[in-house]
Image (cartoon, grey):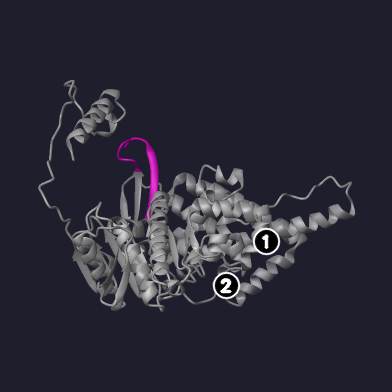
């Protein structure tokens, strides 16, 4: 179906358009024309995804200044669904343009989906990793700059003397292929689902993950998880180059406030502090060892910090997490002198960890503001002010890079402590420090938890609204609209709730307590695996489906 909405020709790939879909497109156009943000609610099952994709890709065609569509989803399944729907939309559009002799008007649309390394890796060991952290760590062990440099040196030695026992370490051939060719390559237009990217990687010998990261710079549509835009630790690496002219869509945005809060909150357990302490001791030993045989590397880091460069230039190859702080809130200053040297920084971290362990000995639940917590913390860790705390995450990333630590997974606890310190030292409002000495379910078993909890979702969303000219929040259940706008701290240009159009009475609510065999059925969690409950729900579904048109 082809129709016009105020001088925008819309290519919709189906023969029938619901009234609410047409109204949805009109509201979208109002928001995009005003370069403003919007909240749109339309019931589940009314085709929000295809409506969004049809209109925005048509809008891109009509308005060449619109550069990219950034479509944010919650799960990998939703990501694949969006790319599949987009493929249908673009195939229909291209076919119609070709029929009308206007094929030259259509830009070759390029769309990619980005997910974790584990889902986009062709190395069997990495793709089978149990967690994202493990997969990332294994990838770094094959792709870090010093690993590749060491491999090159070992190859030269091996070529000169094949009798040596130390054979060169194995690198990732797909990453090496990407660095040789894919780093400068431009993919042909198309909709690249995850499976297509994996197949492309096999055929060309390129790493699919890094190929997608590179392709994002010139793709027309990018589909990825909320975290790649909302979590500063990830967005600082993945999304920092995106321009203001992008259209950003958050689908199923009814939980977006929780995503923002989780991204800016840190939870520490006693075991985390123990592991972090061991990490610090291990790093001190590595510094002492490095001073004996390569002190120049430590001096280079020190002078780089003096110049105000917080992180190494090739940190992208190492892909450490970025700072947990919103970029606009990062202090544009050099790292304080008290933590510039690696040894001094580690001594400071030991004091900080020791203080946190002391606070976790409390027997009662406590809640403090960051300001009050810092008031007690600063003298306890022998600081003049809280300034060094703000730089902990960047300083740790720099040190791990300098010490050439590949297995960052082993230092996850120390990174959490550094993120806790950085957020604590940066934000005095919108956060709370909560200490719980035990789990409510087992009040007699000590299990202390220290939380730096973000209480204001707008801290995470406000920079997104300021950075991009149009941000669209949409869901089937995002009412009340004005409440979400206040929670997220913005004023939408358009806020509209659309109802589903029903031509007849088609809703019949039922409360069912027993199945056909008179056995009680329930959706309680502890009853879900009961065979009789499963059997009765299945039989009920079949019976209802047999009479519903």
Residue 521 at x, y percent in the picture: 20, 28
The stretch drawn in magenta includes residue 142: no
SS assignment at label 2: helix
Residue located at (21% from left, 66% from top):
23
Residue displayed at 53% across by 60% down:
212
Nearest the viewer among 20 and 216 is: 20
Gap in Å between the C-alphas at discs 1 and 2? 28 Å
- Report whether 125 appears left or right of 56: right
Q: Is residue 349 left or right of residue 225?
A: right
**Quadrant location of the N terminus in the rendered image:** bottom left
* Residue 148 % position (x, y): 71, 58
Q: In this view, does 538 lie above or below 549?
A: above
What residue does disc 1 label?
Answer: 145
Which image quarter: residue 66? bottom left
**Residue 243 x, y percent position in the rendering:** 45, 75
**Which comes before the other along the chain, label 1 or label 2?**
1
Q: Give the range drawn in magenta.
A: 438-452
Front disc: 1 or 2: 1
Residue 430 visible (yes or no):
no
Helix, strand or loop at label 1? It is helix
- On the picture, is 18 further left or further right than 403? left
- Between residues 321 and 76, which one lies in front from this camera angle? 76
Q: Nearer the viewer, residue 166 or 127?
A: 127
Q: Which residue in the structure is indicated by mark 2?
A: 337
Residue at point 67%, 58% (across, down): 177
Where residue 449 appears, x then y in whole percent? 39, 47
């Amino acid at each position: 179906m082809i129709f016009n909405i105020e001088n925008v020709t819309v290519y919709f790939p189906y023969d029938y358009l619901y009234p609410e879909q047409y109204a949805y497109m009109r509201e979208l156009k109002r928001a995009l024309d005003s370069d403003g943000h919007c909240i749109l609610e339309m019931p589940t099952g009314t085709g929000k995804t295809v409506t969004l994709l049809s209109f925005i890709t048509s809008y891109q065609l009509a308005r060449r200044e619109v550069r990219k569509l950034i479509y944010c989803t919650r799960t990998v399944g939703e990501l694949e669904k969006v790319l599949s729907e987009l493929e249908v939309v673009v195939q229909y559009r291209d076919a119609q343009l070709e029929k009308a002799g206007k094929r030259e008007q259509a830009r070759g649309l390029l769309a990619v989906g980005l997910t974790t390394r584990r889902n986009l890796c062709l190395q069997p060991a990495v793709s089978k990793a149990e967690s994202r952290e493990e997969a990332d760590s294994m990838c770094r062990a094959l792709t870090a700059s010093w690993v590749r440099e060491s491999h090159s040196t070992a190859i030269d030695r091996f070529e000169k003397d094949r009798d040596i026992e130390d054979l060169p370490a194995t690198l990732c051939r797909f990453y090496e292929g990407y660095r040789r060719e894919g780093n400068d390559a431009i993919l042909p237009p198309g909709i690249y689902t995850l499976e297509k990217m994996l197949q492309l990687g096999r055929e060309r010998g390129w790493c699919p993950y890094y190929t997608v990261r590179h392709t994002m710079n010139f793709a027309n549509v990018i589909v990825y998880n909320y975290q790649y835009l909302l979590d500063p630790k990830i967005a600082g690496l993945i999304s920092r180059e995106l321009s203001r002219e992008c259209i950003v869509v958050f689908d199923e945005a009814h939980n977006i406030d929780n995503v923002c809060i989780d991204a800016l909150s840190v939870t520490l357990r006693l075991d985390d502090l123990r592991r972090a302490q061991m990490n610090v001791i291990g790093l001190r030993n590595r510094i002492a060892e490095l001073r004996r045989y390569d002190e120049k590397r430590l001096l280079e880091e020190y002078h780089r910090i003096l110049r105000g460069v917080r992180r190494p230039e090739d940190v992208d190859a190492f892909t450490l997490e970025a700072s947990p702080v919103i970029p606009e809130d990062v202090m544009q200053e050099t790292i304080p002198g008290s933590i510039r040297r690696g040894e001094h920084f580690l001594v400071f971290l030991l004091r900080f960890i020791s203080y946190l362990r002391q606070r976790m000995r409390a027997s009662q639940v406590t809640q403090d503001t960051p300001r009050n917590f810092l008031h007690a913390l600063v003298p306890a860790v022998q600081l003049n002010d809280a300034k060094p705390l703000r730089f902990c995450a960047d300083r740790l990333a720099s040190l791990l890079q300098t010490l050439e630590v590949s297995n960052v997974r082993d230092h996850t606890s120390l990174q959490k402590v550094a993120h806790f310190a950085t957020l604590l030292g940066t934000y005095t409002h919108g956060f709370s420090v909560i200490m719980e000495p035990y789990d409510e379910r087992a009040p007699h078993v000590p299990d202390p938890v220290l939380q730096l909890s973000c209480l204001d979702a707008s801290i995470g969303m406000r920079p997104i609204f300021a950075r991009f000219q149009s941000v669209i929040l949409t869901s089937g259940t995002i009412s009340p609209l004005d409440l979400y706008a206040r929670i997220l701290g913005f004023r939408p240009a358009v806020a509209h709730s659309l109802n589903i159009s029903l031509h007849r009475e088609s809703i019949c609510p039922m409360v069912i307590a027993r199945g056909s065999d008179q056995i009680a059925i329930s959706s309680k969690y502890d009853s879900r695996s009961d065979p009789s409950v499963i059997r009765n729900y299945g039989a009920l579904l079949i019976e209802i489906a047999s009479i519903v048109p």
